[in-house]
Amino acid sequence: MSKSEIDQLTAEFYGAFDNRGGVAPDVTRIRRLVLPTGVIIKTGPEFTAYTVDEFIEPRLLLLTGGRLVEFAEWETAERTELAGDIACRFGEYRKSGILDGVAFEGGGHKAMQFVRTPDGWRIAALAWYDHP
């Protein structure tokens, strides 16, 4: 059951950014998926470590302000290892959208650490690398 719960949590994370067809993205659900003290890290070209709120705010503006439309990202491959109440997932993803009127596609890798809490599995840390 734990692997399927982690699969669902991961899918919910990716789905939080989807604004295709004019649907409002649900970026604030990240607060439910990631521990309040969780860390989210973007590697190059500009290394940045975010708190949950620091991560959410600019993405919410980008996805609801009209600059980034028809956006989605989705996992294409993953390896997940579980050990009791902890799990690690290394995944590949693709993304596409229209940024400032220009269509784009891309992808990268995400590394996610999960912990089982009294309220279920949550993301404790996430790091990602976008392919150039």
Image (spheres, rainbow, N blue to C red):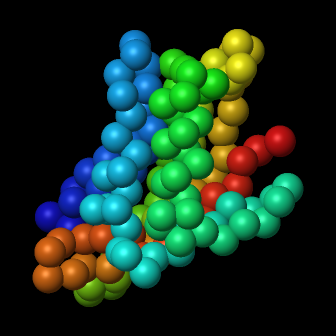
Residue at (60% x, 26% y) in the render: 68
Q: Residue at x 40, y 46 (%)?
A: 27
Q: Is residue 25 left or right of residue 99?
A: left
Q: Position of residue 87 (x, y in %)?
A: 38, 76
Q: Would you say 47 lies left or right of 82 here?
A: right
Q: Position of residue 90 (x, y in %)?
A: 53, 62
Query: Residue at 72% of width from left, 48% of height from top?
Result: 130
Front residue of 19/66: it is 66
**Which quadrant holds the N terminus?**
bottom left
**Of residues 56 and 102, the one drawn nearer to the viewer in this rendering:** 56
- Residue 131: which quarter of the image? top right
Above or below, 124 against 9 in this view is: below
Outermost residue to the bottom: 84
Q: Position of residue 12 (x, y in %)?
A: 32, 47
Count of numbered badges drawn on the protein: 0
Which residue is rendered at x = 40% and y = 16% of the image?
22
Image vertical order of residue 130 relative to residue 103, above or below:
below
**Closest to the observer: 57 or 72?**
57
Q: Is residue 99 visible?
A: yes
Please state the horizontal and vertical placement of residue 83, each as a whole percent of the image. 33, 84
- Is 17 displayed left or right of 45 in the figure? left
Work out which quarter of the rendered image holds the C terminus and state it: top right
Query: Could you tell me if residue 72 is visible in this image?
Result: no
Residue 74 or 124: which is nearer the viewer?
124
Q: Is residue 104 left or right of residue 86?
A: right
